[in-house]
């Protein structure tokens, strides 16, 4: 027979329950610790960065685009207004009744328009009047000093042309100017031109004549003068000190 | 570089824009003062033949002995006739180009660039005439002056070889004596033939046609040796010497030795027509 359980003191039980309740209240009242923050992955970072950078990049690109378009438009406007202003001077230059002095003055005035006058002056070398041929050389000299790169570029294009666009006389003046203006980048073109002149036989002169316009056909005399011009230009260019070569 | 437009003008840049009109103004003033300078010659660049440019005959500065306009017309006509005669003799190899309005004043008008352009365009001779007052106006008419440039000679010898003896520019004065006129003297002169032949000879040597050059040199030599030649003696001697130098050059280019050229061989070359 089991002994009957000892009688439980109701006050002790009440005390026990009270302590239990207090500890539960204490636990509940204790501040809960913050959950560990979740780390962001790369994709989220890119998205955030993208949202920040997109307007900045769009702004910069827009700025450059507008600037480029504006510059291009302004350049065209300048070219147009320049062409209008140059028209009178070009008319004077090509006029057969113009004296040499006046043609020279017109060519120098044209040179003040800088790079925009280079191509018209090269065309004047091709002109049908003696005075404009002489004056155009002076004009190109003057531009070559102030807008060296553009003048060199256009003169190189002229001597590289093999489609009968220019006469040998225009090529001769261009070959000379390339040397006198110190156009270092012209050396390969000058060497190629010398090769195209051939060995000075009648056949080689005929072969060379196919490259230049028909008006005034080249002769052995012209070919020899062209060779002399090339040699002189190459000598000038190769004699330039290295620091000047770099600046060119 | 361009003149400012109303929209683009900027007060800070006004200083720069001011320079261009000033330069243009100076240039136009310069041009206005010298507008009488050497004019162009139409027809020189249009054809590839050898050319003789025949410029204007000009009257002298205003004096009491100014030539009548008929004198100027006669000299012009005579000049053109002589040149046409040379063109015919050459069988069309050389043409005369009248350069109306072109009036060179001296050899200074024939700078290196100008002469080079003329030479590149196959001009062998440029000639112009003028009158000048007679020293004895009461007894004789005005003197006729003829000036000509041997274009290839001036280009190659004077400019490229720096020769002072061969300037390539010659002046001949036709001073009437007694009752004769300057024109009568000019009609008998042989200077033009000699000059054209010499220029052509040099051109032909440069072009590698040495046989043809020798024939032109014969012509030049015989014309220069004629008694009625009015080129001043020192210049004529220099031209004769130059003719011989060219002869040696042409023969050497042809692989012949000048000293071995007999008189007979030379006579044969000279008697053959120039073609």
Image (tube, rainbow, N blue to C red):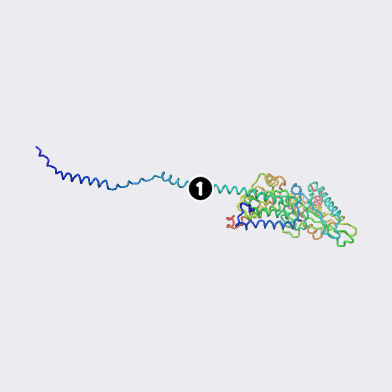
Report the front residue among B51 and B28. Answer: B28
Q: Is residue B234 visible?
A: yes
Which residue extends farthest right?
Answer: B179
Q: Is residue A151 visible?
A: no
Quarter of the image containing the C terminus of chain A?
bottom right
| x and y, in percent, of residue B232 in the image | 81, 60
Q: What residue is drawn where x is 12% and y is 40%?
A: A5
Q: What residue is drawn where x is 12% and y is 42%?
A: A7
Report the front residue among B12 and A63. Answer: B12
| x and y, in percent, of residue B36 in the image | 76, 56
Mark 1 residue element:
helix
Tell which subunit mark 1 falls on.
A
Report the front residue among A116 and B117. Answer: A116
| x and y, in percent, of residue A200 in the image | 69, 48
Quarter of the image containing the N terminus of chain A?
top left
Say whether residue B109 is left or right of residue B13.
right
Q: What residue is drawn where x is 89% and y is 57%?
A: B180
């Amino acid at each position: 027979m089991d002994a009957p359980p000892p009688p439980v003191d109701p006050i002790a039980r009440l005390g026990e329950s009270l302590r239990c309740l207090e500890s539960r209240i204490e636990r509940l009242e204790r501040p809960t610790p913050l959950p560990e923050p979740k780390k962001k992955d790369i994709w989220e970072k890119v998205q955030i960065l993208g949202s920040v950078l997109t307007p900045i990049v769009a702004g910069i690109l827009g700025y450059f685009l507008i600037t480029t378009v504006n510059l291009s438009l302004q350049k065209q406007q300048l070219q147009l207004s320049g062409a209008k202003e140059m028209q009178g001077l070009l008319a004077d230059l090509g006029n057969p009744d113009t004296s040499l002095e006046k043609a020279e003055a017109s060519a120098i005035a044209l040179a003040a328009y800088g790079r925009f006058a280079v191509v018209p002056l090269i065309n004047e070398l091709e002109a049908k009047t003696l005075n404009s041929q002489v004056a155009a050389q002076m004009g190109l000299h003057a531009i070559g000093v102030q807008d060296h790169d553009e003048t060199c570029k256009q003169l190189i294009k002229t001597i590289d042309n093999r489609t009968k666009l220019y006469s040998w006389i225009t090529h001769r003046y261009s070959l000379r100017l390339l040397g006198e203006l110190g156009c270092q980048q012209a050396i390969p073109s000058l060497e190629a031109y010398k090769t195209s002149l051939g060995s000075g036989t009648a056949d080689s002169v005929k072969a060379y004549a196919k490259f230049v316009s028909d008006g005034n056909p080249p002769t052995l005399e012209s070919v020899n003068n062209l060779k002399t011009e090339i040699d002189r230009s190459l000598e000038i260019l190769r004699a330039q000190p290295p620091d000047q070569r770099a600046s060119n | 570089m361009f003149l400012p437009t109303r929209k683009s003008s900027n007060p800070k840049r006004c200083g720069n824009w001011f320079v261009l009109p000033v330069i243009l103004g100076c240039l136009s003033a310069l041009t206005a003062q010298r507008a009488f300078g050497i004019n162009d010659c139409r027809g020189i660049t249009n054809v590839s033949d050898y050319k003789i440019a025949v410029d204007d005959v000009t009257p002298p500065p205003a004096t009491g002995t100014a030539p009548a306009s008929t004198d100027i017309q006669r000299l012009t006509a005579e000049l053109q006739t002589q040149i046409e005669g040379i063109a015919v003799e050459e069988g069309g190899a050389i043409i005369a180009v009248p350069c109306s309005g072109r009036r060179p004043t001296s050899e200074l008008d024939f700078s290196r660039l100008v002469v080079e352009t003329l030479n590149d365009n196959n001009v062998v001779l440029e000639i112009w005439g003028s009158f000048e007052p007679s020293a004895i106006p009461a007894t004789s008419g005005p003197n006729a002056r003829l000036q000509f440039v041997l274009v290839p000679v001036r280009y190659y010898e004077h400019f490229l070889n720096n020769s002072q003896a061969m300037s390539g520019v010659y002046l001949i004065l036709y001073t009437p004596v007694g009752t004769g006129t300057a024109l009568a003297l000019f009609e008998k002169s042989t200077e033009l033939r000699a000059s054209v032949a010499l220029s052509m000879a040099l051109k032909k040597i440069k072009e590698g046609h040495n046989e043809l050059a020798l024939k032109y040199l014969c012509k030049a030599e015989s014309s220069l040796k004629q008694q009625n030649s009015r080129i001043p003696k020192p210049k004529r001697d220099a031209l004769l010497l130059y003719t011989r130098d060219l002869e040696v050059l042409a023969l050497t280019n042809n692989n012949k030795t000048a000293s071995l050229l007999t008189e007979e061989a030379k006579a044969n070359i000279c008697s053959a027509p120039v073609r």
